[in-house]
Amino acid sequence: MFEWLGENWWALWLSAFLAFAVIEMITLDLFFIMLGGGTLAAMVSDFAGADPWLQIVVFCVVSLLMIAFVRPVALSHLKKGPSEQRTNVDRLIGEQAVVMEPVSSDGGLVKIGGDIWSARSAAGVLPAGQKVVVAAIDGATAVVSAASEADGKS
């Protein structure tokens, strides 16, 4: 069996690629998939007739180049995005809410969409019925400010 593997490096590279792909699916860090790209390049070099030492060099060079140049660009694209792609509580920031119980810096209740949230005021006391804007989410508490303060730009 080892003799066959020694003659068929492509099988080693394919196995390494599959292993890196599985590890990448677990970690989701875009590191192991870059190593997987190096294994695919080494496998192509094997099909092109390169010696095993050259295949290893191709694997190392391509992997390092991908980690140095492709991974940072891919990570930046994954982390940025328009506000409509925000998820969970991040999506609530900037939304309008209605004060249900007076909100002070100590606490209160607001209705955001159809949900009641505990809230605290960014500044001053906000009376019941006032429209406010969610400035931030701190744990399970919405930090709100008066709509006129937040919308003063418009």
Image (tube, helix red, strand yellow):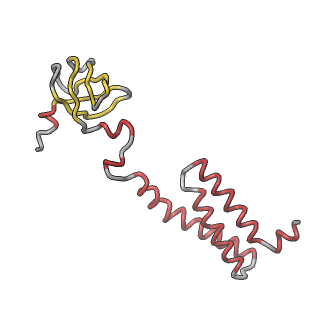
Above or below residue 118? Residue 3 is below
Q: Position of residue 93 (x, y in %)?
A: 28, 38
Instruction: Name the residue at 39% across, 38% down.
Output: 88
Q: Which of the two residues, 112 or 27, is positioned nearer the viewer here?
A: 112
**Quadrant of the drawing holding the C terminus:** top left
For the point 16% across and 37% down, the residue is: 150
Screen quadrant of the N terminus = bottom right
| Residue at 54% from the left image edge and 65% from the top image edge | 66
x%, y% of residue 120?
26, 23
Q: Kindly indicate the quadrant of the structure image that contains residue 149.
A: top left
Q: Quadrant of residue 141?
A: top left
Q: Is residue 39 above or below residue 144?
A: below
Any part of residue 125 in sight: no
Residue 36 image position (x, y, % from top left): 62, 62
Q: Determine the residue positioned at 22% across, 25% down.
A: 121
Report x, y in % for residue 10. 74, 71
User: Is residue 61 placed above or below 94 in the rendered structure?
Assistant: below
In screen coordinates, is 115 left or right of 64? left
